[in-house]
Image (tube, helix red, strand yellow):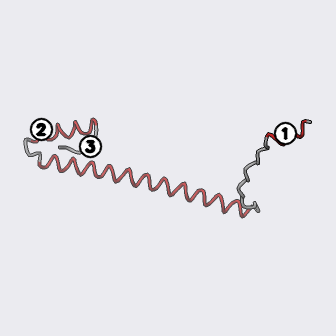
Amino acid sequence: MVPGRGSVKIAAALALAAAGLGGGLAYKKFKTYLHQEQLRKERKERRRRAASASEKEEQKVRAIRNGAAPKSRKRPRKRKSAAAKSKRAE
């Protein structure tokens, strides 16, 4: 019927009803508006991701420049078995 969710969908239905049975121009404008909103959200998200990625890259460069050694992953600690504990207790 009409695109959108929640209150947006209601507004679209009202626009269609006000424009008559066909909806025509109002429907097209509304659909264009929704598409523009979606594009705006995607652009904003892309910019945010790019900014955080460049910031991480910048931090790495800064760390290397300051002489910090690259971080190595810690090895998981080996758990002691119950047998080893009992031997030690005796």
Q: Residue at x 60, y 57 (%)?
A: 56
In the figure, is residue 88 to the left or right of 5? Answer: right
- Of pointers 1 and 3, the one earlier in the residue sequence: 3
Which residue occupies the foreground of this view, 69 or 52?
69
Hey, what amino acid is under mark 3? Gly
79 vs 55, nearest the viewer: 79
Quarter-wise, where is residue 63 in the image? bottom right
Residue under the image location 13 percent in, 49 percent down:
25
Disc number lying in front (2 or 1):
1
- Give the labeled residue for mark 1: 85
| Left-right relation of 46 to 79 | left
Evaluate if marks 2 and 3 touch, with contact meaning CB atoms under 8 Å apart: no
Residue 36 point in image, percent of width and height: 30, 52
Q: Quadrant of the C terminus?
A: top right
Q: Residues within 10 Å of mark 3 (few under 14, many from 20)?
A: some
Specify the quadrant of the image occupied by residue 65. Answer: bottom right
Left or right of residue 11, residue 51 in this image: right
Residue type for callout 2: Ala
Q: Residue furthest left?
A: 21
Contact? badges 2 and 1 (CB < 8 Å): no
Numbered label tally: 3
Q: Position of residue 72 (x, y in %)?
A: 72, 58
Which numbered circle lies on residue 4? 3
Which residue corresponds to mark 2? 17
Q: CA distance from mark 2 to mark 1?
A: 79 Å
Which three-letter amino acid code belongs to the residue tagged 1?
Answer: Lys
Q: Which label's residue is closer to the chain start, 2 or 3? A: 3
- Residue situated furthest right in the rendering: 90
